[in-house]
Image (cartoon, helix red, strand yellow):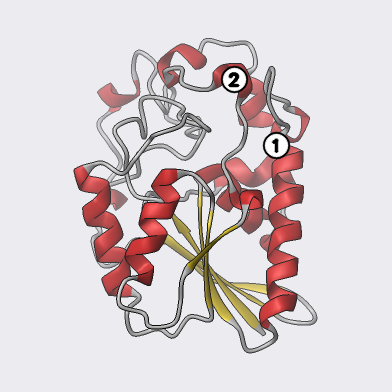
Amino acid sequence: MTTLLLARHGLTELTGPVLAGWTPGVHLSEAGAAQAKALGERLAGLDLDAIVSSPLERCQETAQAVAAGRAGIRVETDERFGECRYGEWTGRPLKELAADPLWPVVQSHPSAVTFPGGESLTAVQHRAITAVREWNARLGAEGVYLVCSHGDVIKAIVADALGLHLDQFQRIIADPASVTAIRYTPLRPFVLRLNDIGGDVAGLRPPPAAEHKDGGENPTGSDAAVGGGAGST
């Protein structure tokens, strides 16, 4: 029964207002570094057989914070856990992208989406799930490991574990520095925790209606934040 912990990277200066994608040199902000440190402290008492990361800097830095103080364990990189390649959408403000004709398709029918000059969300899910299965086999039935990845990648993995069609993955939230735990058994996966950010309940209160106006990462209040957004707290 291999146990997978999915951790999303901490905040960056772009997280939320801009779709960073594979933009190089996007590091954790001061707040994101604090989130990563707190994540490492939360998980300090849990033995991990491996820590795996997307190659992008924000994930590498978050994963290193989890690895800190763990003797004999180093962060391994797997590009299959890298961010969706958003192509021409990369580096553009979400407020601007919300006016793009592709935006409603991303929201309601993501399995049909291939980002212009980029990757399809179906391909993202396929590569990520393939990587999970290979790591599960490598670490064995008693393995416990952490993968640090990105919002849409984590949501795609969770949708598969829940038996949901990819078109339903926008119903799932993966906040910065959150932990989602999935236990894989011979018959089915079990989602043990979802978007766990610790004891703070502030994010359970919905934001003021004014925050949904004029675009932004969730312009209608019903839209999912493409790329994962800046979090619910």
Q: Which residue is mark 1?
A: 121
Residue 223 at x, y percent in the picture = 50, 30
Residue occupying image coordinates x 76% and y 49%: 126
Q: Is residue 219 shown above or below 189?
A: above
Q: Is residue 35 shown above or below 218?
A: below
Residue 171 tag number: none
Residue situated furthest bottom in the rendering: 142
The kind of residue tagged 2 is Trp
Could you tell me how far apart the alpha carbons at marks 1 and 2 are, in whole angstroms? 13 Å
Q: Which residue is mark 2?
A: 103
Residue occupying image coordinates x 67% and y 85%: 1
The kind of residue tagged 1 is Leu
Left or right of 192? Residue 68 is left
Q: Can you tell which of label 1 and label 2 is closer to the viewer?
A: 1
The foreground one among 179 and 137 is 137
In this view of the protein, can residue 163 be seen by the observer?
A: no
Residue occupying image coordinates x 69% and y 19%: 117
